[in-house]
Amino acid sequence: MNVGDIVKSLSGRDENGYFLVLKAENGFVAVADGKTRRINNPKRKNLKHVETVMENALPEIAERINRGEPVGNETLRKAIRDKIKNGR
């Protein structure tokens, strides 16, 4: 899994929710959706508990995250919603 991938949560309170991977390391990912999990407070999830839905789905947002530039929660929320709705 890489930064910019869209994943679906397989367990927990956020089960069946869609998230953007912000960071991946040591068998865990940090994910955010811009609504329940904001960019400044991402959820740390075990790789076993997420499923990749789209690889490199939001490269422009991933580049901004990698450069350390701010990304708004509303921007993230809309981008995920649009990709899930139209990208499948």
Image: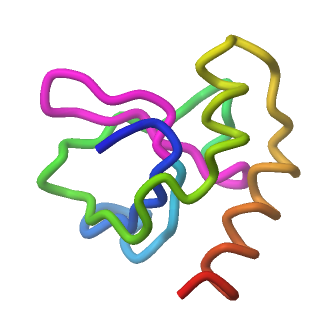
Q: Is residue 74 above or below residue 83?
A: above
Looking at this view, is 73 or 63 the one in front?
63
Colouring scheme applied when the structure was drawn: rainbow
Q: Position of residue 7 (x, y in %)?
A: 40, 61
Residue drawn 67% across and 64% down? 80
Q: Which residues are magenta?
A: 21-36
Is 66 covered by the magenta stretch? Answer: no
Q: Is residue 82 above or below residue 59?
A: below
| 43 left or right, relative to 44 | right
| 47 left or right, relative to 6 | left
Residue furthest to the top in view is 68
Q: Is residue 62 above or below residue 47?
A: above
Residue drawn 45% across and 52% down? 5
Provide the major secondary structure of the magenta segment.
Answer: strand
Looking at this view, is 43 or 88 the one in front?
88
Q: Position of residue 43 (x, y in %)?
A: 45, 38
Q: Position of residue 8 (x, y in %)?
A: 39, 68
Residue drawn 75% across and 50% down? 76
Q: How many marks?
A: 0
| 84 left or right, relative to 55 | right
Question: In which image quadrant can residue 27 be found?
Answer: top left
Looking at this view, is 79 or 74 the one in front?
79
Looking at this view, is 55 or 29 the one in front?
55
Is 23 covered by the magenta stretch? Answer: yes
Identify the image quadrant of the N terminus: top left
Residue drawn 62% across and 45% down? 59
